[in-house]
Image (spheres, grey):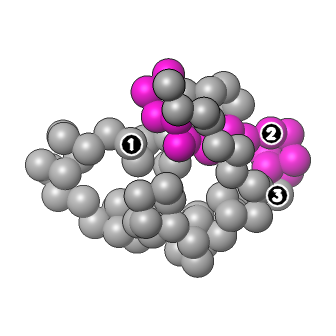
Amino acid sequence: MRKTVKIDNDKLIRFFKNEATDSAGRTLKDILLFNDDEIEYCHNFIQWIFPTQMKSQHNNDAPIIDSDFKKLFQ
């Protein structure tokens, strides 16, 4: 089993500004340009676009946000 990697708030903010990539090397712009097939067959981007405070059961590389991130993102 792979260990969950904590993504720092700065990297996640930069991801949303298209200044950093997700764990697969994609920017937010890359993900938003996915075609229907890519969306259907690739699901590891969901937790990057909609991060939560809970560890993902499906993507060990997904970011986990905290209250500091919520304040920074607003």
Query: Which secondary structure lies at badge 2?
Result: loop
Closer to viewer: mark 2 or mark 1: 1
Is residue 65 a member of the stretch shown in magenta? yes
Q: Residue 15 location, x and y as percent?
A: 58, 65
In the figure, residue 12 lies in which quadrant? bottom right
As drawn, 29 above or below 74: below
Query: Which secondary structure lies at badge 1?
Result: loop
As drawn, 3 above or below 12: above
What's under tag 2, amino acid-wise? Asp
Side (left or right) of 60 relative to 64 = left
Closer to viewer: mark 1 or mark 3: 1
Residue 61: mark in rendering:
none
- Pointer 3 or 2: first along the chain: 2
Pointer 3 residue: 72
Predominant secondary structure, magenta span:
loop
Q: Would you say residue 50 is visible in this rendering? A: no
Quick one: which residue is furthest to the front in this view? 1
Is residue 59 a member of the stretch shown in magenta? yes
What's under tag 3, amino acid-wise? Leu
State yes or no: discs 1 and 3 in contact (Cβ < 8 Å).
no
Residue 66: mark in rendering:
2
Side (left or right) of 56 relative to 55 = left
Q: Residue 1 location, x and y as percent?
A: 50, 25
The segment highlighted magenta reads 57-71
Pointer 1 residue: 44
State yes or no: discs 2 and 1 in contact (Cβ < 8 Å).
no
Closer to viewer: mark 3 or mark 2: 2
